[in-house]
Structures are given as C-alpha cells and as structure tokens.
Amino acid sequence: MTERVTGCEGSAALPAAPAPSEGRAPRKHRTGGFYGWRIVAFSAMAMALTAPGQTTGISLFIDPLIDDLGISRTEISTAYLAGTLTGACAMPLVGRAVDRFGPRRVMAVVAAVFGAILLALSFVTGLVGLTAGFIGIRMAGQGALSLVATTTVAYWFDKRRGLALGITSAVGTAGISLAPVALERLVAGIGWRQAWAAEGLAVWALVLPIALFGIRNRPADVGQHVDGASRPPDEHANEELTGWPLRRALRTGMFWAVAACLAASSMLTTGLNFHQIGLLGERGLTPVEAAANFLPQTAAALMMTLVAGALLDRASPKAVLTGAMTILAASMILIRFVTPGWSAVGFGVLLGTSNGLLRAVEAGAYPRYFGTAHLGAIRGSAHTITIAASAFGPVAVALGHDVTGHYAPAMLLFAAVPVAAAVALLLARNPEPESESGGSRRTAHDPDLSEGIT
C-alpha cells in the first residue's frame, strides 16, 4: 500500500532526496511485459551471489585457513565475530545511499567492492588481514548486497510485493544453499586462495552487469507503474514516494517489535546451525545424520518463503511474524524429544519453516508499515540489528551448553526469546498510514528527507 506521513511533531515537511530519475524524462514504455518481473530475476541472482559472504560459503575455508595460516579455531571465530559486528554497523549508511542514489548505483558499487575484497583475501597472510577481509565480505556480501537486492524489488511492487519478495528470497536462498557443494570442490581442487580469487571474479562478472544493465531504480524510469498497472493510482504517482522518515519510524513500537522478531530468529537459527552437529549428536544422531538435517531445513525454508510471500499480499505482516515466532519456539522445545528418525526430520522442518517465513516477511513488513520513501534507511537500521544478533547466536548457544552441561535444557530457556518477541509484536500498534493534518511526501524536486537523521 502507499502510505503518507506528517512531518515530525507538527513541523513543516522535511525535505526529501532527489529521485534517482531526476533530471531525465521517463523512458518510453518497454515491450515484453512488466519490467518488475525482470527486476525480481536480477535481484534473485544478486541474492544468490551473496554466498561468498554468507556463513555457509565461508565455512568451507575455515579449516584450510587454520592449517595454512597457523591460527587457532578460537582466533578465527573471534575474527569472524568482529567482522560480522563491524560489517553490520555499515548497513544504515548503505540504506541511506539506496534512498539517495538509487539501488542501481549502490548495487554496482557494492559489487565492485565485494569482488575486490574477495580478491584481496586470496593474498591474506595473517589474522589482522583475515579480520579485515571478514569485515569486508560480511558488510558487502551478507549485508549490503542482499539489502539492495530486496529493497529494489519493494520499489517495483505494492499489491504483489509479498509474492515478488518471496520469489526473490526463495531463489536467492536456493543459490546460497547450493553454493557450498560447488565451493567444496573448488577449494579441494585449486586451493582456498585461488577459490577466493575465483569468487571475486565471478561477482564482478555477474553482479556488475546486473547492476549496470539490468537493474532500474523504479518503474517510472522505464515508463511503467508499480505492479505493472496501466495507469498510476493518481496523477502524482510517478512523481513521488511516500513514507515515514527514519527518525519517526524509530519512535514506533512496530519498528522495534519487527526488529526483535528478526533478531530472535537470526540469533537462534545461526546458533543452532553453527552447533548442529554437536547438538543433534547429543540426541543420538551420527555426524552424517546431523549434517543431513540441513536438507529438510532448506526444503522447508524454500517452500515457506514462497508461501509467506503469497500470504503477505493477503494477511498482516504481524500475523505472519507471530506464526514464525511460534514455530521457532516450538522447534526449540522439540529438541528435547529429538531422536534419530522422523522426530529429527520434524525438527528440521519446523526450523526451516520459521526461517522461510521470516525471510519473506522481513523485506515486506517495513514497506507495508512505513512506506518506501526512506525504505533503505529503515531497512538498513533493522539489518544492523539482525546481523549483530546472528553474530552472538553461536556464543549464546555455547554458553547455554556450558552452563547446563547439555544443549536441550538451554534450548528450553531460549524458547522464551521468540515468545517474548511475539508478545511484543502483538502489543505494538500499527503505525498510522496517513494523517488528517496533511502528509509529508518525497518528490523529485525535494532534498533528502533522511539527511541529518541520527
């Protein structure tokens, strides 16, 4: 939906960023249907190519790095934690850049930086350089590229935004999930240095052309309208974006409630996946059986990402998020009863289902509640919280194990985390989409509304 908002505390409307298409006339309508579905395809490809910056993609390099660089597992884990947290801090800046310059330029810059850092990692010789590299690939790959890709899709869709984001997330997740298979063979065949260099060249060869020749900032750039409509809903539809500025969104309970759900899922899912072999081994599964549990998790996540996207077009994000938190809490409780066989598969399905629901709704909830005028800044701030939570997940699960002596008792305690997030979400009030006293709009002729926001 398109939402408007008044200026803060009754003040005059704040200025807004120049639209990325300012200064040039919209292009003629393209043939071949609505260009937004091409945006979905390009964004999904970009999402898949975040794999070198994702935990699953980096995990294949850990043991070779320990052996060749002579560093301990604790040292490399600490470097990874520092890299993830530091990289997360850049997400609000990336989000604001998307609002100011448009996703096309930002994606091109991110791809160039991401590829360069991967190439630089192929020359790393010690812990300091490795830590710097982790900061770069976690910031550019796991954070910035995925943020830009999904935000771009949100600009092109309104009524079908959930479906479009669901497809983007599902295809991107499939690519990320399959990447370790190819990377394992690559590292084994040519070594970790050459594998990182090959990843950097692949990012340049694939993501840069997508950004420069495939991505278009908004429908008006190609003479089209949101959702492929034949005409805009009103005469100003191609001239403005409406929505909440970041500082007003940060004052709402809904922003923090949604962020709490995302953080709970990110922390617990990352922690469980990181310790999955030991956790399921404690329940009687062999290492092979524990590793195979990623398969039902991935299958359920992919299916539910598409389902959640369709649900988001018809239901409130609050309902979908509450369901995801409930299922995540149930998976925490089920761990105590897991044994080899179907109960282990059921655990994997529950965990994957919760993760899949969150992937689609994360990108759709914020534009639903706060509009798209400053979506990059808003989602960038939420992304920082999500990534930071993922960094602490493995530590939290390990501490729980150390305190109780087993994984299962700690998981019962952790089940309270998604329950608390769901309660906070249910208590949060929906932001008012429009005020009778007048709305604040971002037009092609206004300066940046998010400028100066702290």
Image: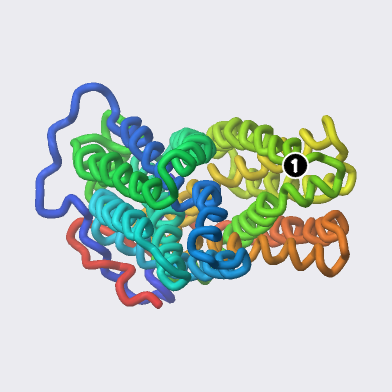
Q: Within the image, what quadrant is residue 101 found in?
A: bottom left
Indicate the position of residue 314 as horizontal and vertical percent values.
56, 35
- Nearest to the observer: residue 64 or residue 205: 64
> What is the quadrant of the N terminus in the image?
top left
Does residue 305 appear left or right of residue 100 in this picture? Answer: right
Mark 1: amino acid: Pro
> What is the quadrant of the C terminus in the image?
bottom left
- Nearest to the observer: residue 203 or residue 160: 203
Badge 1 marks a residue whose secondary structure is: helix
Indicate the position of residue 212 as horizontal and vertical percent values.
20, 44
Which residue extends farthest top? 32
- Nearest to the observer: residue 436 or residue 22: 22
Indicate the position of residue 46 as horizontal and vertical percent values.
37, 42
- Nearest to the observer: residue 381 or residue 176: 176
Does residue 75 appear left or right of residue 340 in this picture? Answer: left
Residue at (40, 69) in percent of width and height = 129
Q: Is residue 366 above or below residue 294?
A: below
The answer to whether residue 235 shows anywhere in this view is: no
Residue at (53, 64) in percent of width and height = 80
- CA neighbours of label 1 inside 10 A, class few (<14), some (14 to 19), many (20+): some
Q: Which residue is mark 1?
A: 287
Q: Within the image, what quadrant is residue 14 found in?
A: bottom left
Residue at (37, 70) in percent of width and height = 7
Residue at (28, 31) in percent of width and height = 35
The answer to whether residue 270 shows anywhere in this view is: yes
Indicate the position of residue 211 as horizontal and vertical percent values.
26, 44
Which residue extends farthest left? 24
* Protein image colouring: rainbow
